[in-house]
Amino acid sequence: MKPYPWMTSYAVADDIYMCHLASKYGKLVINPDMKITHHESPSSRDKAGRVARATAVNHYYLLNLRKAPVKNYAALLWTLTYLTGKATLKRNFNAVTGYASGILFVLNPRKNKYSEYMLD
């Protein structure tokens, strides 16, 4: 599976993307008994700001792929606002900058860079 062009660096929500793509080729069946062991790295391979921005951008495009209603975008902004506040309280200002950049991206009505990938 090839990533969409916006999935650079840290691939936040790559599991959702893979399920979305798989469902285009047939019935997607999920086995609730299946277990996956995730060996999380003790330190991020990317800086907090890049991961935070990727959280916003990737979820925005996944909502776009699913043709989500406006309320889902509002929920994304609400979540990003919460995460920005949480990062601020933890004094993780790199993450704060990334979330702020992501929020501005979501709110930007002129983004069309990847619009050709939104067409089915």
Image: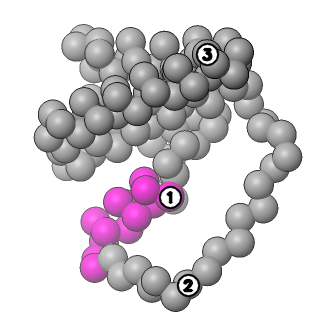
- Dots 1, 2 in contact, CB < 8 A: no
Q: Nearer the viewer, residue 53 or 27?
A: 53
Q: What is the chief secondary structure element of the magenta stretch?
A: helix
Question: Label 3 to label 2, Cα distance in Å?
Answer: 37 Å
Q: Is residue 24 magenta?
A: yes
The mark tally for this picture is 3
Q: Which mark is residue 15?
A: 1
Q: Earlier in the sequence, mark 1 or mark 2?
A: 1
Label 1's element? helix
Residue type marked 3: Thr
**Residue identified by numbered label 3:** 88
Range of residues picked out in magenta? 15-27
Label 3's element? helix
Q: Which mark is residue 34?
A: 2
Q: Earlier in the sequence, mark 3 or mark 2?
A: 2
Residue 39, how many percent across, how many down? 78, 61
Residue 22, how many percent across, how many down? 38, 68
Label 2's element? loop
